[in-house]
């Protein structure tokens, strides 16, 4: 039978109110008394059910998601998953709201973070722009005891508590291997479409991609990166212009803006053989897989990322451990033959 607070009180010779103060780290307990209670807890093997205690007290977790304001399908999907989480809020005892900031704008992100330091939410999940000012703002909040999770794009080198996203270097390496294998012995140039080199996920994907290409597919030359800012219109213009180069035999889209990519491919590449690898399974990339405009999609589960961020933020707010295996976000590879 599991020990209870009554057992702790009896073993320590104190009242239930004193046990409650010690468990909740509240003041008003003498040092010697606190030691008696903590000794009883250890000897009895008492494990506090924080979730049950919070449920009994009716605790609600105010959480904030900071997302880039962007007209791309992946971010629309991420927003949709957060809206689903909001619908689950009564059962999960959360109070979730989203704040949108201009994409790839470190100053705007810092401004929002500084504002949240005055609001005192239980936790913050953010799509990070990797810049020194952002890292400094995150570190200040963590030192003030705000749990912070980076979502989709990480902020390594900061004090953030957890990253809910895929291994982007591995994703880039996987894309290179797929593209190289699909192209076989062909020689030519590879166009790379990114959003911005200001975000770590895009830089890491490019790093993984270029390393495998250089090591194993030296006959494939990578052209200078096109930065489409995850905007379908900008991506369309950049890709359409690039495809005027007859030497291009492959395309790697490592960010979003894939609606523009697909439109450019269909306009200018219908009479040529291109191998195309892209990220994120959306309605548009699914259709492009089916009609052979795109050959393979690397996907991260936005719903899993949102749910993981919520679990981690609640655990950190309660001082509980995170189960690493449960929070690992896998990288899925989809061809037209294994679409879900």
Image (spheres, rainbow, N blue to C red):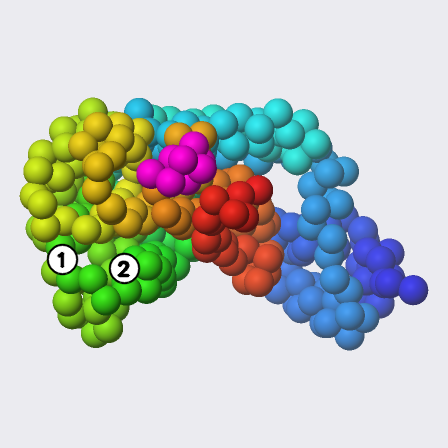
Of the numbered discs in the image, which one, if any, rests on residue 129? none
Q: Is residue 119 visible?
A: no
> Which percent across, then down, holds residue 202?
25, 49
Residue displayed at 67% across by 63% down: 34
Q: Is residue 48 visible?
A: yes
Of the numbered discs in the image, which one, if any, rests on residue 183? 2
296, 249: nearer the viewer = 249
Q: Which residue is mark 1?
A: 188
Residue displayed at 13% across by 55% down: 189
Task: State the CA–CA distance, disc 2 to disc 1.
Answer: 10 Å
Estimate how packed mark 2 is, as few (under 14), some (14 to 19) or many (20 or more) residues with alpha carbons within 10 Å. some
- Residue 179 drawn above or below residue 283: below
Residue 83 among magenta residues: no
Which comes before the other along the chain, label 2 or label 1?
2
Within the image, what quadrant is residue 215 found in? bottom left
> Which percent across, then down, holds residue 163?
42, 53
- Residue 186 drawn above or below residue 249: below
Q: Which residues are magenta?
A: 286-293
């Amino acid at each position: 039978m599991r020990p209870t607070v009554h057992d702790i009180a009896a073993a320590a010779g104190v009242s239930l109110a004193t046990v409650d103060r010690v468990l909740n780290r509240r003041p008003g307990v003498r040092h010697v008394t606190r030691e008696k209670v903590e000794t009883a807890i250890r000897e009895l093997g008492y494990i506090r059910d924080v979730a049950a205690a919070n449920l009994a007290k009716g605790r609600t977790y105010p959480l904030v998601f900071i997302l880039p304001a962007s007209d791309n399908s992946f971010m629309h999907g991420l927003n949709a998953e957060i809206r689903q989480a909001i619908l689950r809020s009564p059962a999960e005892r959360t109070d979730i709201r989203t704040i949108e900031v201009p994409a790839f704008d470190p100053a705007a992100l810092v401004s929002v973070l500084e504002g949240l330091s005055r609001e005192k939410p239980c936790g913050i999940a953010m799509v990070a722009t990797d810049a020194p000012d952002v890292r400094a703002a995150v570190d200040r909040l963590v030192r003030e005891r705000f749990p912070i999770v980076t979502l989709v794009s990480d902020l390594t080198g900061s004090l953030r508590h957890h990253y809910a996203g895929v291994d982007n270097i591995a994703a880039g390496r996987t894309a290179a291997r797929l593209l190289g294998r699909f192209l076989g012995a062909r020689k030519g140039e590879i166009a790379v479409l990114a959003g911005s080199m200001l975000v770590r996920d895009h830089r890491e994907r490019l790093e993984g991609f270029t390393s495998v290409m250089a090591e194993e597919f030296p006959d494939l030359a990578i052209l200078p990166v096109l930065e489409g800012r995850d905007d379908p219109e900008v991506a369309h213009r950049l890709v359409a212009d690039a495809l005027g180069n007859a030497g291009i035999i492959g395309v790697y889209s490592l960010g979003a803006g894939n609606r523009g990519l697909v439109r450019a491919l269909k306009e200018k590449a219908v009479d040529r053989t291109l191998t195309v690898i892209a990220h994120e399974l959306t309605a548009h990339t699914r259709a492009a897989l089916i009609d052979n405009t795109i050959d393979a999609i690397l996907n991260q589960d936005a719903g899993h990322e949102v749910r993981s961020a919520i679990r981690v933020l609640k655990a950190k707010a309660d001082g509980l451990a995170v189960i690493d295996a449960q929070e690992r976000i896998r990288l899925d590879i989809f061809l037209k033959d294994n679409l879900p």
